[in-house]
Amino acid sequence: MSETQTPIHGLGHSPRRKEDDRFIRGKGNYVDDVILPNMLHMAVLRSPLAHARIVSIDTSQAQALEGVVAVITGRDMAAHNLAWMPTLSADTQAVLALDKVVFQGQEVAAVVAESAYVAHDALELIDVEYEPLEPVVDPHRALEPDAPLIREDKPDQKSNHIFHWSQGDRAATDKAFAEAATVVSLDTFYPRCHPSPLETCGCVADVNPATGKATIWMTSQAPHAHRTLFALVAGLPEQNIRIISPDIGGGFGNKVPIYPGYVVATAASLLLGRPVKWVEDRTENLISTGFARDYHMTGEMALSADGKILGLRSKVIADHGAFNAAAQPTKYPAGLFHIFTGSYDVPAAYCEVDGAYTNKAPGGIAYRCSFRVTEASYLIERLVQKAATETGMDPVELRRRNFIQKDQFPYRSAVGWVYDSGDYQRALDLALEKLGYDELRREQKEKWERGELMGIGVASFTEVVGAGHGADFDIAGLRMFDSAELRVHPTGKAILKLGVKSQGQGHETTFAQIVASQLGIPASDITVVEGDTDNTPYGLGTYASRSTPVGGAAAAMVARKLRDKAVKIAAHLLETSEEDIEYSEGRFFVRGAPDRAKTIQDVAFAAYTNLPEGMEPGLEGVHYYDPPNMTFPFGTYCVVVDIDKGTGQWKTRKMVAVDDCGVRINPMIVEGQIHGGLTEGFGIAAMQLITFDEQGNCIGSNFTDYLLPTSWETPSFEIYETVTPSPHHPIGAKGVGESPTVGSPAAYVNAVLDALAPLGITNIDMPVTSDKVWAAMHEKGFV
């Protein structure tokens, strides 16, 4: 063994005492409130290295510690055929490392003890001997022929290449570029970032040895899908598994995957016959749970002499980390990146993406976006900004010349999307009016003449959400439909059960309002239930803005089913034909005689007491909604910034957001979602960064290194709307929760680069920090 391969006895943990309560308890995770009799606690030992062979693991001292019930290693899991688990992208992931570790923070062993404090103290007593290997943290290096092979566990894996995927017409696109008057190119990196939910991940697994029933409280955005995957991994009968997802304290995509901690806790409960709780701490959440982005993107735009876009093409290297655990539709290994033509009428387009393994935690989750739409939107809006700079055209005018026009909808894009509806020009015009665009451009010119830097950034985005028709969209083979079950009680009160799962989006309000609008039952009389697989219909959960486009549609459809039955009952009560009954706002009345009426409450009581002959009693039903298409929310965001040329610091003076999410159900909830998304977009553009040094050490493992915007840094937002209903959604809604995070980063970055354009600075990769801006200006001799 060479000097560089000296074994390392690494732990990465130190004993925890009761004064470290906030660290142990994951800062108050809701799952941590679950207390069961005879419950055990689990802590996980993680690798301090990014790439190393495991020479040996000595757990004897840990097992001898008073209060320790069990120490579990990868070999123990393998003995029960639980060493590997499937990922949501049809890969396999080690539950606990066996022969080697492949990213810093990978799970190596677990301790189950009588208390969380003992479990964490015991981690320090596990002695792991590592033989370091060369880490690979750059995906370009990972794809080189001589790069160290990361996934030696896969017999057919001869390189670190995961997939090659493409979409569009390459020949037509190449022809467009050959005929172009101008070709604009951009190399940019959308860095790795983290959803950082308010609460970390955790679970309490209770496998009853007498009944074989497994009840698992877990931080899940998709409890039904997780139940199916648990059945496949653990071999438990699915009807004996109950997943309960309580208030989970935010998700943003971070709580869609299944993590090894869930599996080990469940296996430990199964083997020990006692409930086992695992709650990760903040550092564990940041270094080992699902990351987002990490896309190295090259984009090219072909333009005619008059500024019309003739073609687009892109080439992407996607860093998926050590396991391909991205949560995205099976047919689309690069997610929905092919929405990269954005809001523009582009005749020819072609994109290709190559995925690579690296020695990083698995990434690729849909962090407040619909499967890589954020990266695609960022690329096209940055390309438009650069094209405007290089051609000398106003970026607003360039957009206007190339927008898909209102009368072109439904619009089929060059890469196969069918956009449902839109009015991009109206959203842009409203944003510019509220911004005061023309006056700001005059001010900008005057400031530049005085040596001052001011920029105006525009981003006109189109998102694609809802994860459409199940024939084309599934995760792990499960079609991406969703469900709603509605039961109206004899007194006219109702309970609505859903397959989606709120993480703070206000489902309890929004979905009750949807049912109220269809049946006339007051929203306050409707209870909404989610997150319990024994008490809700099967659904795929909440992510990719699925709630309203899919779950909301299911709620509307089941309410209409019940209304159809209610019409028949009302006709019976009013002694008239069904065809003569009209409905309006909770009242069923005879056509032409509005005083002859029955309320929905009257009808509900009759459904259990006075039915037409031969009709089945009750007023309840279930609907599984498989959307015919995606929905396409859109909008325009405008940002004005001022830059201090002495420090490179930039400050947002004004931010205007115009969103079109179709029909708005609850404007206050919509505005809250937009505010949150705009804040996250600002944080990604300005400060958030998970990066790695050459040894694979994660830089960004705490909130000192990984910066989140507070109220102090976050700018004020002016929010406006246009409304363009979706023609295929039952109530015309499109979804909005992710749009602001999709559209706003480019607006911020475009504003900074607009200010720097006279200096010839056309790109700074996010996060656009003051030191990067100062260095770029210094290189141009401006400071």
Image (cartoon, rainbow, N blue to C red):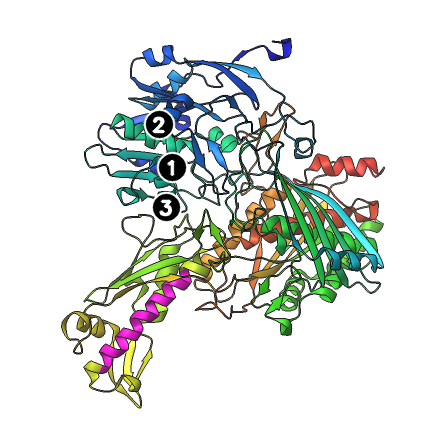
Q: Which residue is drawn at the image coordinates 66% and 70% (left, top)?
A: 405
What percent of the width, then of the height, locates residue 690? 59, 34
- Which mark is nearer the camera, 3 or 1? 1
Mark 3 and mark 2: Cα distance apart in space: 24 Å
The residue identified by callout 1 is 233
What percent of the width, then of the height, locates residue 381? 69, 54
Read off the magenta span.
552-571
Query: Is 703 situated above or below 166?
Result: above
Ranked by sequence position, the earlier of labels 2 and 1 is: 2
Q: Out of 1 and 446, give the one closest to the viewer.
A: 1
How packed mark 2 is, by other alpha carbons closer than 10 Å (few <14, some 14-19, many 20 or more), is few
Q: Out of 667 and 363, give the one closest to the viewer.
A: 363
Which kind of residue does numbered mark 3 sit on? Pro
Mark 3 and mark 1: Cα distance apart in space: 15 Å
Could you tell whether 77 is left or right of 742 in the image?
left
Q: Secondary structure at mark 1?
A: helix
Could you tell whether 260 is left or right of 434 in the image?
left
**Based on the displayed image, in which of its 4 quarters is residue 71 positioned?**
top left
How packed mark 3 is, by other alpha carbons closer than 10 Å (few <14, some 14-19, many 20 or more), is many
The residue identified by callout 2 is 80
Q: Is residue 109 magenta?
A: no
